[in-house]
Image (spheres, grey):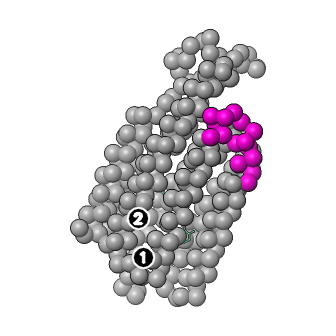
Amino acid sequence: MTETNWLWIGAIGMLAGSLLLFAAGGRRTQDEEGHSLVHGFVPLFAAVSYFAMAVHQGEATLSSGRVFLFARYLDWSVTTPALLLGLSMTALHGARRRVGLVAGLLVSDLVMIVTGLFFGASQVPFIKWVWYSASCVAFLAVLWVLFVPLMQEARARDQVRRDAYVRNAILLTVLWLIYPVLVLAGPDGLGLLAPTPATAGLAVLDLVAKVGYGLVAMLGSKAVTSADLIRGEVSAAEVVTHAVPSGALRPARHA
Ligand code: RET
């Protein structure tokens, strides 16, 4: 298969995954709706980027002759913060707590991707490795937030939410650690892998990290919401639709 074929597989797979996630997502509470939207939009945005690369718009030919698929980094600059937002919502029981910490997490992630973009575009080896190292440092900051302050937050919640957070944080970390290795081996890095196998590997990894992880995270969020509703821990203000029986609601504090 050619590299372009793999880019089309990415575009179509992401579009199908997005439709699946939008259809499967729950919308009973604001929290559940937030997860459904995050995980539906992540592959949709990736489909846009894969389409752009498949039709050769998301690329630039550098003076060295290397074809640089920059659209990947545009995809990641939107989708990785969105995935981290979903994960922090799981730890924090909603997106409106510890706003500074969540903002710090998302900005560190953006630094990781922007420095990664400059790494991919670099042609001078010394400069290239400065960018790569900077991106790795930002990645370590992201992992620190996930495993120290957000883990402490998740530990303070109920068993279902805590388990969902730990499972998702570990799965996300394992998948994300493959990116710097694959990109390093590919044409943007050391060039050990030819463009076609590098693109094939990233297309499969991207599908697993967005659609596969998205399904796991969204099913987790549904289980968390069901457990919240059973315990009667959801106020009327947090409910989105009338699908929730009123007996399951705790009176809103400011009602
Ligand atoms: C780069 C550049 C080199 C150093 C590091 C990188 C990390 C990339 C990561 C990307 C994750 C992307 C995901 C996309 C799908 O949703 C940019 C390759 C550390 C972690 C999860």
Which of the two residues, 72 or 160, is positioned nearer the viewer here?
160
- Disc 2 to disc 1, C-alpha distance: 10 Å
Query: Residue 143, how many percent across, how many down?
Result: 65, 59
Specify the farthest residue to the left: 1
Which of the two residues, 34 or 160, is positioned nearer the viewer here?
160
Q: Earlier in the sequence, mark 2 or mark 1?
A: 1
Position of 28 relative to 209 (above/below): above
Q: Is residue 109 visible?
A: yes
Specify the farthest residue to the top: 247
Task: Residue 162: say if magenta.
Answer: yes
Q: How many residues crowd around disc 2 within 10 Å: few (fewer than 14), some, or many (20 or more)?
A: many
Q: Is residue 32 visible?
A: no
Query: Residue 83, how many percent across, how many down?
Result: 55, 50
Which of the two residues, 58 or 225, is positioned nearer the viewer here?
225
Query: Residue 154, how many percent across, how many down?
Result: 70, 42
Q: Which residues are magenta?
A: 148-163
Which of the two residues, 51 or 210, is positioned nearer the viewer here?
210
Write the residue at 51% across / 81% down.
Answer: 122
Write the residue at 55% across / 17% down.
Answer: 244
Task: Residue 154: say if magenta.
Answer: yes
Position of 227 relative to 138 (above/below): above
In this image, 139 relative to 22: left or right? Answer: right
Using the image, tell me which numbered label, if any, was put on residue 186.
1
Q: How many marks?
A: 2
Position of 50 relative to 88 (above/below): below
Q: Hey, what amino acid is under mark 2?
A: Leu
Write the residue at 76% across / 20% down.
Answer: 253
Screen quadrant of the N terminus = bottom left
Our reading of the magenta stretch's main secondary structure is helix
Q: Which residue is mark 2?
A: 202
